[in-house]
């Protein structure tokens, strides 16, 4: 359990939090620019001192204004990947990497440097690295210090797409391998969705939503962040069975509904998370006999939300406790004569799936 | 043991160097000298400096040490005497001047003298000017040097047309000329007292005596000093 | 080329200035760091104290040294009794005088450098588990190298030129305390010895110049490393 | 015309370019981290001096090693938004903004500060701004200096999603309003696709592709950047007509094919650009009678590319000179019995459209 | 409380040191900037020249000043003929001596600060159309304020303490060139006048201390502005 119960006035911004985070998994910290994300993790790391309150990491009370506890940063065992890389300019990359590395496990060193693609840089000085190279070294340096908690401030923002894609799975693995909580600041909903188990929404220094990702995702606080075109639902499911011939996996939703997805290498019953974008869901009155779309569900129209302009609409569909959204044009809605309660077939063209076997809470 | 050490007022530098060399040659004993302001040397001796012989530029600092019992009182004797000279810079024209006509000749220029507040040469100069009733009219036209050398330098560099310095310095100056010697009757006798420092090494006595020898006297005289005995002899 | 007299003064100046700077460096760096990084009551006072030797004429400093650190001085006699140390009329005293006169320059240069190092590197080091001491030695100190070098040269040059405090504190004893400036003084006091004084003057200049160029070169090497 | 014909050795990286850019519109500079993007724009801005070659902006030869011309940065009239914001720490935000602003047009100032959401920050000092706030001020500062060319080094990387979405249209407008070329470094393909007219691919200091976006997009050099799931085609079309009843617009493709999209406010014949993701295209043998999908095209199977794992495939479809891609599972492909030459219906669920009326070249 | 004698010396010291620092600032900042930002042949030589006054004992500097800037000096006589300027035996000469002795400290402190300003701000300013001069005045100079203040205090303190060069160059003329250290010296040279010397010593210390605290306070205000 990680408890952050603090107050801090920064200029006109008053940071005030009272949150508990699980001691495992990735928690995303999400909010506007200037909402206090960096300040909050600085408070946790001990780089800023709260005006009052307490911070507990596991059994370790690192700050308590009443008991006058205020552990210095180096005693908090927190890894920090800064928004700017902050590599030590006078040390070679290899020395930077080993700065906080006490155990000096050569295998771990090799794995991490290879993964981050920084092996060829080891003998260089930071000044000659490009922005992305610097950030990769900074991530490696924090990982190698074997922290008991990791704070990451937009660590992927300066990476290019292939590197991002390459790093992602490693970050995903991170929590299963090392049993430490990660607090992850990001502006990218995609990143958050792929990585995070918990989501904290911060606005003007206050936590306005906090909880398991799927929950916060569908909360009203999240709406401003989801552009109409990005409207989506997040569903929790369990692995049901594998297709005998094709590399496909069936997922069981709550109420006997089942969806096919590209093969997931996991055992039955493994919990997974699905994200289905409204724009990937099309509606037909009668499904085609032969279609490339694998997932066609019979659902009931629950409500229709017209966009501000009235040109498009978001159809909320229901099947038992499962809800999905479909985004279609008004023209199509009229043609289909959509009305609340109507039964219709939802064709789901795509979805993103993340195995959630590591997440105890979900 | 450490070599014999003489603490001497800095105006004695080259004369004393030569005397020490002569003594070294004769007695095969090493002598070293430390030259600085008489004041600094006196304070150092008072605080236990490793000196055997002290030669001051006037009696004030010798008296200070004798009060402190830092010198062997019985050994205090005048060693040398000096006199003052009015000099003119080589940059200055050759119109005739005397001490008395100085105030009218200075115009906007200054007269260089050693600081009358504390430098011995300055104190004697002040006495002489006072005796001549010139002090009041010259008081505000004085460029006060921190010692005789820097006073001489002001004249040599033409900063001031005239200056009053020791005769010993004036004689050796290449860039100034002596206009007149100032009569010794106008000020207290300018004497350089010598003393054995309280904890002097036994061999120091020999050097002390050598400083009064004719051999040393010849050297001192060559640099323009007058041996104290001579003055007394003259008076007699 | 150089007379024995000149060589002796030169070597002595080197020894005195070198030792003075060497021994000033650790306390100088420490004080600079404390002044650059921490706030505490009495900080301004400490800062002023460090600047004192700059404000006072060297002769006064020499006088104060004589009074306090001389054989009969309060501190001097204690040091002599307890540790058997004596600064009186030895090159060690000359080094002490030089060190005190040059100390404000050393501290100021290093402090200026330290103040310009972004604390973000120190913060990063602490999150990597380094305590303030390790941070100081592995991050702050190396990043300050150019400033330390600059301060060292400045202080060394000042030591080479030190005269008033030295002659007042430890007198002008050949081979022991007669450094280049004191030797120069002896010639200046001698009518007609301007040429000899000028020679010593040039020796002092060359000495300082060499140390300056050396520091420049070192500083460049250090900074090149940071940017390759 | 902007001509950049230079060489520069930077450590082990040799930058060598010979490119001509149109003097209007946005050119995206895209490449791996460390490929030399920042170095290249530094060379153009005059912050780095090339080892040889020449740079001409319009009629202004700003660098020529043979003629010994090397204009200093301030005479190149180039606005530069740096990867790090580089706000002057001793100046208030308002003074930072006006630093390069010679004309002091209060309207322009108002428009830009409002757009960037930095009006409330004007009286603050940079040190108290968050990362995103800083970057917004930096963008404003560069815009207000009325440059004749704008260099932007990942300007949106540190902005949050709503700000990004807010800024995008303005950046899009930028080129129509001010007639200056923009060289835009970005890691985000989405950003590039929405903003850029030209695309330069840089790899290890060399330009490996350069030309109109659609062309470079479909070039083989681009493949490593497009994850299978992001496979897409970019098509050029012209506005055909508006729907009389619904806010929909018909677009005419090359060969009498036509597609519906949400309304575009532009005149007939306006050129537009479409991006159609393969994952948004589903295939049916016989189209449903009533479907929410507006665009169903009869096409011919040109080829089928199986993915490395063989679990999914990319179907290349053709209708006249128009090519689109559909990504489906192998299972679906087998069920549909797809074969080269077969006629099939492509259902296009979504597409992104950018009006291109400003682009002379396209 | 203070005797007339003390007040006269104090005011003179203030005037001399203030003017010396004021006139040193523009060339000092310029030289620091040139040394910090440009590479050119003879740079090391220039740097060494600036350090010279540090290496030479002040008395020697006074001597050299007398030779060059005195009434009959090469430069001094020219200045006198063409502009009617004269430094001889005036407080202007004292200010000149103080300025020269303190100059290396001023330049070094400012240069250290300038070297630590990231050139990325200067680059950004240039892309915004500012020529090097505008960049210097609007970016480099303000960002160096703490360094300039530090250098100013350092130099001011050194000026307050200046003795040897002053007394050699312009002698010790009450009300004109008898600054605090010169007044102090007279007392030290007089047996039994230690108390008077100590009073002057304390006045000098308070003067330097005040300027130090003032600069500290200014520097803090400037830096607070940067971080709010
Ligand atoms: N020392 C300070 N004094 C005054 N205001 C401050 C201070 N530090 C931070 N702030 C303000 O607090 C707010 C939060 O800053 P912070 O850097 O935590 O934002 P952020 O959420 O990380 O933003 P971004 O996503 O842009 O990085 C900002 O508006 C900033 O201006
Ligand atoms: N002064 C230099 N000396 C040696 N190598 C350098 C120097 N400057 C840059 N490099 C190298 O040149 C390469 C290109 O750097 P650059 O910053 O231009 O990359 P970039 O494409 O902007 O990367 P990013 O997307 O990460 O910002 C990097 O590998 C960097 O290490
Ligand atoms: O040698 Mo002295 O003590 O300066 O007159
Ligand atoms: Mg932040
Ligand atoms: Mg870059």
Image (cartoon, coloured by chain):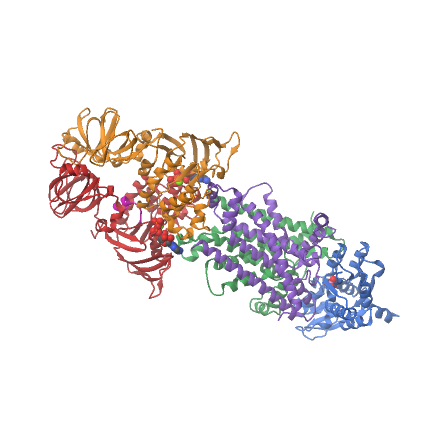
Chain colours: A orange, B blue, C purple, D red, E green
Toward the viewer: D149 or A187?
A187
Give the residue furthest to the right: B236
Residue toward you, E38 or D239:
E38
**Is residue D186 a member of the stretch shown in magenta?**
yes
Q: Is residue A252 visible?
A: yes
- Measured as percent of width and height from the top left, residue D51 is found at 35, 61
What x and y, as percent, mark residue D300? 12, 43
Q: Does any portion of residue E169 appear in the rendered image?
A: no
Is B149 rendered above or below residue A297?
Answer: below
Relative to B14, say whether D242 is above or below: above
Residue D50, by quadrant, is: bottom left
**Is residue D334 toward the left or the right of residue A33 in the image?**
left
Q: What residue is at 55 percent from the left and 45 percent from the top?
A: E217
Seen from the viewer's position, the closer of residues C176 and B144 is: C176
The magenta region covers D185-193
Question: Which residue ends up furthest to the bottom in the rendered image?
Answer: B94
Task: Judge whether residue D332 is colored magenta.
Answer: no
Q: Position of residue B35 (x, y in %)?
A: 72, 63
Question: Would residue A48 appear left or right of A252 to someone viewing this image?
Answer: right
User: Which quadrant is the N terminus of chain B positioned in?
Assistant: bottom right
- Return the x and y of residue D30 as percentages of the image width and height: 29, 50
């Amino acid at each position: 359990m990680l408890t952050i119960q603090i107050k801090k006035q920064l200029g006109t911004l008053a940071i005030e939090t009272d949150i508990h985070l699980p001691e495992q998994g990735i928690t995303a910290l999400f909010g506007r620019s200037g909402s206090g994300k960096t300040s909050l993790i600085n408070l946790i790391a001990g780089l800023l001192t709260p005006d009052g309150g307490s911070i507990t990491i596991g059994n370790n009370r690192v700050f308590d204004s009443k008991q006058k506890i205020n552990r210095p940063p180096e005693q908090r065992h927190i890894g920090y990947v800064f928004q700017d890389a902050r590599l030590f300019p006078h040390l070679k990359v290899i020395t930077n990497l080993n700065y906080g590395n006490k155990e000096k496990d050569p295998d771990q060193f090799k794995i991490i440097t290879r993964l981050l693609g920084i092996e060829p840089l080891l003998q260089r000085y930071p000044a000659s690295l490009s922005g992305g190279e610097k950030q990769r070294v900074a991530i490696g340096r924090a990982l190698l210090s074997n922290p008991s908690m990791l704070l990451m401030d937009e660590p992927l923002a300066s990476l290019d797409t292939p590197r991002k894609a390459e790093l992602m799975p490693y970050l995903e693995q991170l929590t299963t391998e090392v049993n430490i909580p990660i607090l992850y600041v990001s502006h990218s909903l995609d990143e958050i969705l792929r990585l995070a188990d918990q989501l904290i929404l911060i606005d003007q220094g206050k936590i306005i939503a906090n909880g398991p990702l799927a929950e916060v995702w569908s909360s009203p606080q999240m709406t401003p962040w989801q552009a109409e075109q990005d409207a989506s639902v997040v569903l929790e499911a369990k692995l049901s069975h594998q297709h005998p011939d094709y590399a496909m996996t069936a997922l069981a939703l709550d109420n006997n509904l089942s969806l096919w997805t590209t093969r997931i290498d996991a055992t039955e019953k493994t919990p997974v998370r699905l994200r289905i974008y409204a724009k990937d869901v099309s509606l037909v009155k009668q499904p085609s006999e032969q279609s490339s779309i694998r997932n066609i569900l019979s659902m009931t129209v629950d409500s229709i939300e017209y966009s501000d302009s009235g040109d498009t609409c978001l159809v909320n569909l229901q099947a038992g406790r499962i809800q999905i959204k479909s985004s279609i044009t008004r023209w199509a809605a009229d043609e289909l004569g959509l009305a609340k309660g109507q039964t219709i077939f939802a064709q789901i063209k795509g979805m993103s799936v993340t195995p959630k076997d590591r997440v105890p809470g979900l | 043991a450490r070599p014999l050490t003489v603490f001497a007022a800095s105006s004695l530098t080259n004369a004393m160097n030569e005397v020490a060399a002569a003594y070294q040659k004769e007695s095969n004993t090493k002598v070293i000298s430390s030259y600085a302001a008489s004041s600094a040397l006196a304070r150092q001796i008072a605080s236990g400096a490793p000196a055997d012989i002290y030669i001051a530029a006037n009696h004030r600092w010798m008296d200070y040490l004798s009060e402190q019992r830092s010198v062997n009182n019985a050994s205090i004797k005048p060693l040398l005497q000096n006199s003052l000279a009015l000099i003119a810079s080589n940059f200055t024209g050759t119109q005739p001047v005397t001490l008395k006509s100085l105030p009218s000749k200075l115009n906007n220029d200054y007269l260089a003298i050693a600081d009358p507040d504390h430098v011995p040469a300055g104190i004697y100069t002040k006495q002489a000017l006072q005796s001549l009733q010139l002090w009041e009219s010259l008081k505000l036209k004085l460029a006060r040097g921190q010692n005789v050398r820097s006073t001489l330098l002001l004249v040599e560099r033409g900063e001031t047309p005239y200056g009053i310095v020791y005769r010993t310095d004036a004689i050796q100056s290449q860039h100034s000329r002596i206009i007149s010697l100032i009569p010794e009757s106008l000020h207290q006798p300018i004497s350089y007292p010598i003393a054995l420092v309280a904890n002097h090494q036994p061999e120091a006595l020999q050097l002390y005596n050598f400083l009064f020898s004719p051999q040393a006297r010849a050297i001192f005289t060559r640099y323009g000093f007058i041996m104290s005995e001579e003055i007394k002899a003259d008076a007699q | 080329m150089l007379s024995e007299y000149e060589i002796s003064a030169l070597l002595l100046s080197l020894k005195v200035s070198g030792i003075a700077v060497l021994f000033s460096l650790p306390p100088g760096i420490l004080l600079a760091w404390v002044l650059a990084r921490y706030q505490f009551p009495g900080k301004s006072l400490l800062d002023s104290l460090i600047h004192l030797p700059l404000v006072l004429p060297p002769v006064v400093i020499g006088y104060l040294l004589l009074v306090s650190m001389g054989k009969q001085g309060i501190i001097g006699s204690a040091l002599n009794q307890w540790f058997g140390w004596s600064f009186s009329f030895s090159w060690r005293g000359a080094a002490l005088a030089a060190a005190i006169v040059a100390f404000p320059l050393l501290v100021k240069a290093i402090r200026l450098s330290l103040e310009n190092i972004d604390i973000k590197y120190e913060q990063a080091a602490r999150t990597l588990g380094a305590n303030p001491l390790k941070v100081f030695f592995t991050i702050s100190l190396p990043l300050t190298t150019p400033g330390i070098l600059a301060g060292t040269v400045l202080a060394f040059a000042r030591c080479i030129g030190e005269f008033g405090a030295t002659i007042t504190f430890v007198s002008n004893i050949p081979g022991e305390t007669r450094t280049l400036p004191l030797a120069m003084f002896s010639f200046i006091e001698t009518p007609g010895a301007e040429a000899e004084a000028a020679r010593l003057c040039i020796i002092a200049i060359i000495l300082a110049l060499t140390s300056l160029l050396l520091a420049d070169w070192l500083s460049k090497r250090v900074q090149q490393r940071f940017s390759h």
